[in-house]
Image: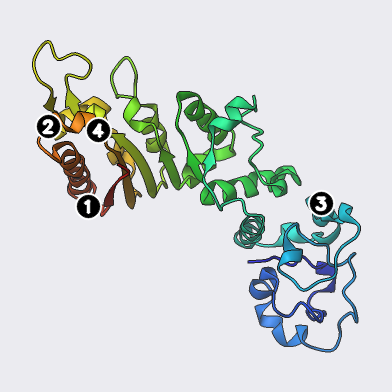
Amino acid sequence: MGVTVISLDQIPRCKVAPGLQRVTPIFLQEVYRRDQQAILQDKRPDITSMEDFPWLRGSLKILDAPVVQDHSRLTYAKIHTHGFKRFQRLPLELREMIYEAAMWDDGHFEVPLRVITQVYENRKPAFPSFLPAICRVSKQCRIEATVVYVRNATFIVNRKEANEFLTAFLESIPHGKGFRNMKQIMLPSFHMFPGTSMAPMMDLDLMARCTSLHTLKVTMHVSPLWWGRGCFDEGPPTCKTVDEIVAFFGLEKIFECRKLRDIYWDGIGHWGMEDYFQRGALRSLLHQLASWVEAEFLRRNDQKVKNVVKWRF
């Protein structure tokens, strides 16, 4: 969806200028729905001036518009101060729709975000580089647009440092709105961190704080699913039971996610390990674990959570 920004001083008297009929500003659709007849009257500017119609980055690839030579006009700050004089008077729901459309238009949600890159770049959690430019227009836009970003983004957390960074970033958003709006997270290293007293499962702690979390992707290697890894002096390796796996990872905490809808188990097999067991035993164990989680959500929370297991190898 493209967002065409026009001067609010021209509304409701203006009509969408020739060449722009294929894309209607979303605030015209929502705020001035009752004034559609007035908007379509002849009282409108003859041409589309760049002063009244500054372009958002990426809009030129959507609209059949002339090329803008003065690229200084592409800044969100200019749009906010010049074309959005009454923007803050719009209801919050409509402002969030505009933020979201601008972010989708700029491609911010096309791929999941690897949080660990922020740690490598020495970024501060309160000012991460992944936030869209519209979050830097003003203090109010930063708060409102950052919430919208968190609500739509998918975060990849694969290390302790990434977990700490994301937690600090969400804590920096006022009034707990960061945790309340987090909806999707991927944990590609979940199987590497058992939930013991010496190494608490930080990923589960983060999930429990995200009260609106609805989609979770967990990577599970077969190695934590059996006893006797490394040395077999005490006997042959044996498969763990579902109860032992739950205790090993501290999975009981997952039931605090009361809005969870989908869990995707990303299984990673290992032919060398699986040869010690009956064919498919370890893979079957992960399916049993997923079934147990689904049944327990229904029993404890009366909550339907779809569990999907897929294997890479």
Choose the circle earlier in sequence order: 2 or 4: 4
Choose the circle earlier in sequence order: 3 or 1: 3
Question: How far separated are the C-alphas under marks 2 and 1?
Answer: 36 Å
Q: Is residue 259 above or below residue 243?
A: below
* Label 4 SS: loop
Please give the residue where the numbered disc 3 appears in the rendered image: 75
Horizontal side, residue 22 vs residue 300: left or right: right
* Label 1 SS: loop
Choose the circle earlier in sequence order: 1 or 4: 4
User: For residue 236, what is the image quadrant?
Assistant: top left
User: For residue 102, what is the image quadrant?
Assistant: bottom right
Q: Disc 4 residue type?
A: Val
Question: How far separated are the C-alphas under marks 3 and 2?
Answer: 61 Å
Q: Which residue corresponds to the image point at 86% horizontal and 58% vertical from the top-left?
A: 82
Q: Disc 1 residue type?
A: Asp
Instruction: Between residue 41 and residue 292, name the one nearer to us.
Output: 292
Q: Position of residue 131 (x, y in %)?
A: 65, 42
Please give the residue where the numbered disc 1 appears in the rendered image: 302
Q: Which residue corresponds to the image point at 14% horizontal and 15% vertical from the top-left?
A: 232
Choose the circle earlier in sequence order: 3 or 2: 3
Question: How far separated are the C-alphas under marks 1 and 4?
Answer: 30 Å
Q: Position of residue 283 (x, y in %)?
A: 19, 40
Q: Are marks 2 and 1 in contact (CB under 8 Å)?
A: no
Instruction: Between residue 214 and residue 233, name the one nearer to us.
Output: 233
Please give the residue where the numbered disc 2 appears in the rendered image: 277
* Label ID, residue 222: 4
User: Which callout, 3 or 2, points to the residue nearer the camera?
Assistant: 2
Question: How far separated are the C-alphas under marks 3 and 4?
Answer: 50 Å
Q: Disc 3 residue type?
A: Thr
Q: Disc 2 residue type?
A: Phe
